[in-house]
Image (tube, helix red, strand yellow):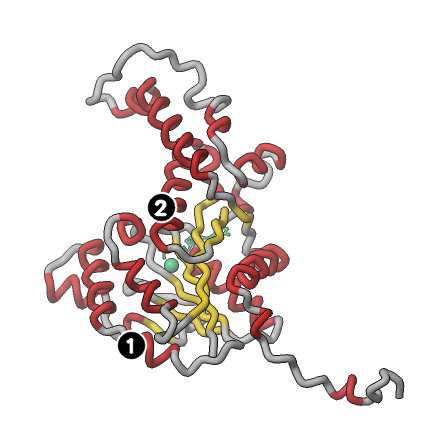
Amino acid sequence: MSKFGVLVMGPAGAGKSTFCSSLITHLRNNRRSCFYVNLDPAAEEFAHEPDLDIKDLISLEDVMEEMGLGPNGGLIYCFEFLMENLDFLTEALDPLTEEYLIIIDMPGQIELYTHIPILPALVRHLTRTGALDISLCAAYLLEATFVVDRAKFFAGTLSAMSAMIMLEVPHVNILSKMDLVKGQVGKRELKRFLDPDSSLLDDDEMTAGIEDDGPADPTDNAAMMRGSSFKRLNKAVAGLIDSFSMVSYLKLDVQDEDSVGSILSYIDDAIQYHESQEPKEPSDEVELYGEDGFE
Ligand SMILES: Nc1nc2c(ncn2[C@@H]2O[C@H](COP(=O)(O)OP(=O)(O)OP(=O)(O)O)[C@@H](O)[C@H]2O)c(=O)[nH]1
Ligand SMILES: [Mg+2]
């Protein structure tokens, strides 16, 4: 029996939990079953109560108090604890049938995606044949407001690419909070960010016109950000992203159900959800008709 899921990731405040909630609403409106897993040990409030919550295993507050750790160290400890107690996930997810979409809401600490090998190990446990065997899609969210500052946008894109390479599962990248840039950034301009390439930096107002006049004073932060070495660094990062040509974005406006539905259809395709569904029983209305389609 196959299972299906989506792992919702991205930096702090990118809109992960809001996306999970709008996805749940959309699935319910379309009579589809879902199972919501919260893996953020610091999350307190939810629009939809999680079906499984890491806080029932371990809470960040307790860890910080008992172990004397800060919020980021505490989060890493919580994930190490989860990895030692994977039965917590297995027992809850194992009975789910192929009809369910398992939605996993992750915390926003970026070090979880880039620095430590916990996430690949977790994904291997979720997807391994013979274990949970979940056909899993990773969804990486980045705030659309990042497009205003192109250096920030490429830094975010680099973190999305790093997650893609590290996890080795089907992946969709999402520009969230589209409502915040509507009116600020033109449609044609926005389109260039959906398939980013390094030419975006050529006409960047923030760094355009900078001459290569040697290294900036390292104690002057603002000057560093305007300096030519900063421009060269951004060019190099954008060139690296270009050369992999892996990252493109889907647009998300959580207020618009069609937008959520369109992202869901990309996720469904990536995990081949529809291919594995049992044919549904014909409805009563259809049963009024004979096999030849006539009454
Ligand atoms: N305008 C707008 N605000 C949004 C949208 N999505 C989320 N937000 C707001 O952004 C803030 C963060 O949203 P969350 O969904 O909690 O983000 P998150 O990625 O789960 O955050 P962490 O779990 O703390 O990393 C909240 O105040 C949301 O109301 C959106 O599409 N548009
Ligand atoms: Mg959240």
Query: Residue at the spot x=37%, y=49% of the render?
Result: 165
Q: Label 2 belongs to which residue?
A: 162
Of the numbered discs in the image, which one, if any, rests on residue 65? none
What is the secondary structure assignment of the residue under circle 2? helix
Q: Residue flagged by tag 1: what amino acid is it?
A: Phe
Q: Is residue 179 left or right of residue 103?
A: right
Contact (Cβ within 8 Å) of mark 2 with mark 1: no
Q: Is residue 21 visible?
A: yes
Q: Give 283 or 123, whichever is nearer the viewer.
A: 123
Q: Quadrant of ligand 1?
A: bottom left
Q: Quadrant of residue 124?
A: bottom left
What is the secondary structure assignment of the residue under circle 1? helix
Mark 2 or mark 1, which is nearer to you?
2
Query: Residue at the spot x=41%, y=30% of the render?
Result: 239
Q: Is residue 47 visible?
A: no
Give how far across and how far down residue 271 sits, in percent.
51, 63
Q: Is residue 109 above or below residue 206?
A: below
Query: Residue at the spot x=67%, y=85% of the render?
Result: 281
Q: Quadrant of residue 268?
A: bottom right
Q: Residue flagged by tag 2: what amino acid is it?
A: Ser
Q: CA distance from mark 2 to mark 1?
A: 28 Å
Give how far across and how far down residue 66 sits, in percent.
11, 66
Of the numbered discs in the image, which one, if any, rests on residue 88? 1
**Sequence-first disc among 2 and 1:** 1
Q: Give 178 or 153, whichever is nearer the viewer.
A: 153
Q: Is residue 248 left or right of residue 286?
A: left
